[in-house]
């Protein structure tokens, strides 16, 4: 089969399409023929060496969707031919086939395309964990979602809107703001505007926002604190550097700043996340947005786009 291989850390061009052996499932494992693989910023961080040493060569990617091709012994509830999305792999997702633990494979409803399915795992588990497991957002609260036109932001908007929250989203382009509004934001702001935090405060009737979903903490965290309501919470799910904040803004509001990792949950919490995601996909509450599809060989271009381009839905690779 063909797969992207990385033999050394570096720029996106270290990713090359190569011929590798087909995977075979051991007991408790499943082989999925990949129809689409999702590209996430964490894939680029790993490729650049920011996550420490890993064995070379390796195939990038945790997210994909496809059809079960082979099932190892002792696997229950999964059969050859099932449509699935992948929440992690053993061999990597940027490939024609992926070897997974059975626990990493989840049903993909018939109303969801493979390309959409490739955009499910990291965006939707991150958004769910942030809102419901880390900051415990509830109906009626005002939620500010930064990067509401990106894959994680869209997921957060859809979850928050479905749960009865008042959603304020930010995006940096006209098309991104239109997309954020289409996905359920009650109010959409231009995050390039210097007064968009004041506008967010105004949309909360100057009471302050209850929850912030923060994808760029190095740029926004200090400002987020100034628009929080009493007992407000900030879920930090992304940052590209250091930031300086005023502790007084935290103390005066008795605010909380919590970190979020989609892989940070317990086994039970992870099971709950995927149960909620599958239900939302089935009933149409959750609708992954595919912004761009590229051939598998163009993985380097995909990494540059996700790190440099304006956020607009999910970038997927198609073998």
Image (cartoon, grey):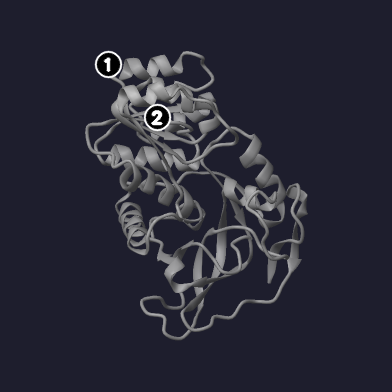
Residue 142 in view here = yes
Q: Where is residue 28 in the image (x, y as percent from the top left)?
A: 46, 80
Q: Position of residue 99 (x, y in %)?
A: 56, 72
The answer to whether 15 is drawn above or below residue 212 in the figure is below
Residue 171 in view here = no
Q: Position of residue 245 (x, y in %)?
A: 48, 25
The answer to which of marks 1 and 2 sits earlier in the sequence is 2
Location of the C terminus (image quadrant)? bottom right
Is 178 situated left or right of 283 in this image?
Answer: right
The answer to whether 25 is drawn above or below residue 12 in the figure is below
Of 59 and 112, the residue lying toward us: 59
Q: Distance between the residues labelled 1 and 2?
A: 20 Å
Is 179 situated left or right of 157 in this image?
Answer: right
- The residue depicted at 43 percent of the width and 18 percent of the height is 197
Q: Tell me where residue 156 sits by quadrant.
A: top left
Q: Where does label 2 land, which residue?
A: 181
Q: How crowded is mark 2: few (under 14 residues within 10 Å), some or many (20 or more)?
A: many
Q: Residue furthest bottom?
A: 73
Of 94 and 174, the residue lying toward us: 94
Q: Tell me where residue 1 sits by quadrant.
A: bottom right
Local SS, label 1: loop
Local SS, label 2: helix
CB under 8 Å between discs 1 and 2: no
Q: Where does label 1 land, which residue?
A: 205
- Between disc 1 and disc 2, the foreground one is 1
């Amino acid at each position: 089969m063909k797969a992207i291989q990385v033999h050394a850390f570096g720029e996106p061009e270290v990713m090359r399409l190569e011929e590798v052996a087909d995977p075979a499932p051991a007991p408790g494992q499943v082989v999925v023929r990949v129809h689409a693989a999702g590209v996430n910023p964490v894939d680029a961080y790993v490729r650049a060496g920011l996550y420490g040493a890993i064995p070379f060569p390796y195939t990038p990617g945790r997210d994909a969707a496809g059809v079960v091709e082979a099932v190892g012994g002792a696997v229950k509830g999964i059969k050859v031919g099932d449509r699935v999305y992948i929440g992690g792999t053993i061999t990597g997702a940027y490939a024609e086939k992926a070897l997974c633990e059975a626990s990493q494979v989840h049903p993909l409803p018939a109303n969801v395309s493979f390309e959409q399915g490739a955009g499910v795992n990291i965006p939707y588990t991150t958004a769910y964990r942030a809102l419901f497991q880390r900051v415990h957002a509830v109906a009626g609260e005002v939620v500010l979602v930064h990067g509401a036109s990106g894959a994680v932001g869209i997921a957060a908007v859809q979850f928050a809107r479905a749960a009865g929250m008042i959603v304020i989203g930010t995006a940096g382009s006209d098309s991104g703001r239109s997309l954020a509004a289409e996905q359920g934001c009650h109010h959409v702001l231009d995050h390039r505007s210097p007064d968009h935090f004041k506008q967010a405060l105004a949309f909360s009737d100057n009471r302050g926002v209850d929850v912030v979903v923060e994808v760029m903490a190095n740029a926004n965290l200090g400002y987020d604190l100034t628009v929080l309501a009493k007992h407000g919470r900030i879920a930090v799910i992304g940052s590209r550097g250091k930031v300086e904040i005023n502790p007084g803004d935290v103390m005066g509001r008795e605010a909380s700043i919590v970190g979020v990792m989609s892989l940070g949950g317990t086994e039970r919490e992870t099971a709950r996340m995927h149960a909620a995601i599958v239900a939302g996909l089935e009933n149409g509450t959750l609708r992954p947005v595919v912004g761009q599809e590229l051939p598998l060989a163009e993985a380097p271009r995909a990494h540059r786009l996700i790190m440099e381009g304006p956020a607009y839905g999910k970038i997927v690779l198609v073998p």
